[in-house]
Amino acid sequence: MSTYTQILYQIVFATKDHQLTMTGPGQERLYRFITGILQNKNCHLYRINGVEDHLHIVTHLHPTVALASLVKDIKLGSSELIKRELIFPNFGGWQDGYGGFTYSISAKDNLIEYVKNQKEHHKKVSFREEYICLLKEHGIEFDERYLF
């Protein structure tokens, strides 16, 4: 029997101390690099986008890939790239932890649009508000003392 899955994730993580360091043309370079990591792991990227202090990645996770391992590879590889190529000169690293949220395939198009419009979204809503909303929406219990 073959393996069939449809594991659609939204992965969210921020810069260390939520510093507004991811600005300018370096964002596109970073996104291309992360796209390469996902392709090498046989994951299908639907959308990546973010603002100065955090990223959203919408991807199908290949069944042989563990979410924690993938996020670790993305963070380590992208940190090395950012520092080596000085993409974001004031980048101090990524936050500890991440958010990983699953969605049904029927939500894919709306999720892609949501991530595509991050810059507009964050003119009205802070990352903190957005992240807490995502946690609540997905029924994840949390202690605000340990979020940021």
Image: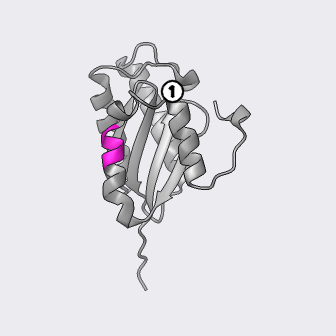
Residue 131, by quadrant, is top right
133 with respect to 22 (left or right):
right
100 with respect to 62 (left or right):
right
Q: Is residue 39 visible?
A: no
Q: Which residue is mark 1?
A: 15
Magenta part, dominant SS: helix
Which residue occupies the foreground of this view, 100 or 43? 100
Q: Residue at x 41, y 75 (%)?
A: 4
Say what secondary structure mark 1 lies in: loop
In the current view of this chain or complex, which residue is farthest to the bottom? 1
Q: Is residue 58 visible?
A: yes
Q: Quadrant of the N terminus?
A: bottom left
10 with respect to 35 (left or right):
right
Residue 33, by quadrant, is top left
The span picked out in magenta is: 113-117
Which residue occupies the foreground of this view, 24 or 131? 131
Amino acid found under the numbered disc labelled 1: Thr
Colouring of the image = one colour
Query: Is residue 83 shown above or below 14?
Result: above
Query: Is residue 16 shown above or below 106?
Result: above
From the top left corner, tell me how far across and down residue 82 is, in percent: 40, 24
Q: Quadrant of the C terminus?
A: top right
From the top left corner, tell me how far across and down residue 129 is, in percent: 54, 35
| Residue 63 covered by magenta stretch | no
